[in-house]
Amino acid sequence: MTVTLADVAARAQVSPATVSRVLNGNYPVAASTRERVLRAVDDLDYVLNGPASALAAATSDLVGILVNDIADPFFGIMAGAIQSEIGGPGGRAGGERLAVVCNTGGSPERELTYLTLLQRQRAAAVVLTGGAVENTAHATAVATKLRKLGEAGTRVVLCGRPPAPADTDAVALTFDNRGGGRELTEHLIGLGHRRMGYIAGPEERTTTRHRLEGHRDALTAHGIADEPARTVHGRYDRRAGYEATIELLRREPDLTAVVAANDTVALGACAALRDSGLRIPDDVSVAGFDDLPFSIDAVPALTTVRLPLADAGARAGRIAMGREEVPPGGIATIRGELMVRGSTGVPKGA
Amino acid sequence: MTVTLADVAARAQVSPATVSRVLNGNYPVAASTRERVLRAVDDLDYVLNGPASALAAATSDLVGILVNDIADPFFGIMAGAIQSEIGGPGGRAGGERLAVVCNTGGSPERELTYLTLLQRQRAAAVVLTGGAVENTAHATAVATKLRKLGEAGTRVVLCGRPPAPADTDAVALTFDNRGGGRELTEHLIGLGHRRMGYIAGPEERTTTRHRLEGHRDALTAHGIADEPARTVHGRYDRRAGYEATIELLRREPDLTAVVAANDTVALGACAALRDSGLRIPDDVSVAGFDDLPFSIDAVPALTTVRLPLADAGARAGRIAMGREEVPPGGIATIRGELMVRGSTGVPKGA
DNA sequence: CTGTTAGCGCTTTCAC
DNA sequence: GTGAAAGCGCTAACAG
């Protein structure tokens, strides 16, 4: 019924082995023979059986990409960039590798489940994107999994995620969230702000913690008290930003600035401020993080920290494919760039 | 070296077949035996070999999702929704299926290549999202591929894409782009607009054509001449929207409204108008399409046509898994909903 | 309910 | 440069 390698071999009058060699192109085959095989493939409309190849060769053309939420451009951009680098020559059969995108939704269990599933698929590589959940048990479990993946020959790359234990052999491209957070708040302090609200992401997330620490570093460095009431935690979405801002305003109506954990949250904050009759930045300044594409179109345009998501993803993809040198120590820190735009200004009283 | 099913069987003192049955859970196995097997699996830290299973069972746990650009929320939202429905019970081994996301970048060749790659993987299902390229040769090639996939047992679903030839057996969930386009322009006409610019997407795309046709339908229905100079084609991105708007304004400075092919383009249009010193909607109204999450945060909020991307994706996912009834005739048309917001208003002179 | 027996379709030494 | 043969690790009849 379905055409197999043997059928092609028969029609081309060669052995199955030769067909395999032609198809994988990693072996010397006489030009005339190759011709004949290729024609037979075409005539029979033959398509290689991926699972069979993978089984026999003990490798697959799949690359796993773990993301929190593929609908979020933060992850979409990285995933797209990774994808764009995993194709091309270097692998088996045509050199095309497929990206298996796994939405963890930020759930540790799903993360582990997907890692196992990718292990089961004998994935050629796995890229974990975005912050990690901070939980010793989970971190240990992930590290163990990564170690096993590595042992099985799966290359592991962390993109926008803190390094894993060194013995996991996972390469890490880490965002300097702390540094970015500090710089952002320093910009605000420089403008004269002293009463700033901070909308943090979900607790138990490295990204959340690092950005918040950066914010606090800046406060401390400038002798500004870190009032606990000025920090609110929430999800990384617009709604959370909206609600957190209302709450922050309720607690302290004369806040002069709101720093959000990311751009999406900042957009929600902007909406809340507008709905509260406050002008940005005249009454309250707003800042985000990430510099997602839409941030420049906010009105006023959002001051934020640009993360080179596409570059980082592309680099992670190349490293995953062994096409780029691993950074020294397996760790590279990627800095963000402060983008000062219209949403931040001198505070009202100043 | 690597532990296999046989190792587990040996340790659990059962036959390999039994282990397989326990792991796949589609077969009656005595509770005590299952216990023993599961313990052995745990002890040995065994992970099933996906390719081997797929080969033996002639099916795989992979579901392909073709998108133009995963970094674009339009596709990200659909992909995420599809993903969320393909897991769970119903399939093999744990019931988890993996989503293989393929970025075609709108290229017909890549689309075909990915389809072949998915065929090679013996994907359980394939979902093609977004508009199709309008090109007879390519359409034929795709139809042929879809037919082959179908014959090989891969379920094919089109999500947000026009139906394929009936003999492909592909289920289509189609967006009513034409109807949405018409409704949007009728809203503008109702407000009093007569000189409207239209920023269309790339030519040779069904989405582009249908939305534009809807726009023209509305013009015609109201006796408004369809000036060719008022339509500009460009990519589906912000930059294209910006440039097209500048061009439109150059051609006809007293335009009272700009209709964009989608929200992203509309954002670019807004930026161009602002940079040109024009107020929205006082001087020029702007409308988009899709109602992506950020559209409500534009200032003023964008009038647009909401497409139920997540619902459509979820439904496509369920159909792909055989968990939802196929719509009559294999085709369902999904309507958009006009969202009137601040970016459109009565034209200046009125 | 469980074991036995054949392969699934391909890759890959090892010879020639 | 090409062929023969031995599996890769698992599933699925078919018995029992």
Image (cartoon, coloured by chain):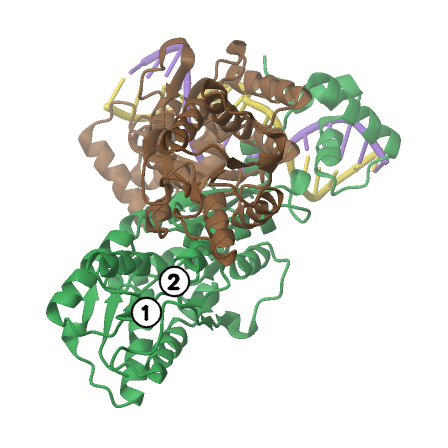
Chain colours: A green, B brown, C yellow, D purple
Q: Are marks 2 and 1 on the same chain?
A: yes
Tell me, yes or no, whether the two marked residues, 2 and 1, touch with CB atoms within 8 Å: yes
Q: Amino acid at mark 1?
A: Pro
Between C3 and A38, the one nearer to me in the picture: A38
Q: Is residue B147 above or below residue A303?
A: above
Query: Where does residue A329 sit, x and y in percent of width and height?
Result: 52, 74
Name the image quarter holding residue B188. top left
**In the figure, B19 relative to A254: above or below?**
above
Q: Is residue A344 visible?
A: yes
Q: Is residue B1 visible?
A: no
**Label 2, residues with CA under 10 Å away: few <14, some 14-19, many ≥20:** some
Q: Residues within 10 Å of mark 1 (few under 14, many from 20)?
A: many
> The residue under label 2 is which amino acid type?
Pro
Can you tell which mark lies on residue A281? 1
Point 38% across, 55% down: residue: A145
Quadrant occupied by the N terminus of chain A: top right
| Label 1: which secondary element | loop
Front residue of A118 and B130: B130
Residue visible at 44% across and 72% down in the picture: A340
Q: State left or right for residue A49 relative to residue B37.
A: right
Q: Nearest the camera: A219 or B219?
A: B219
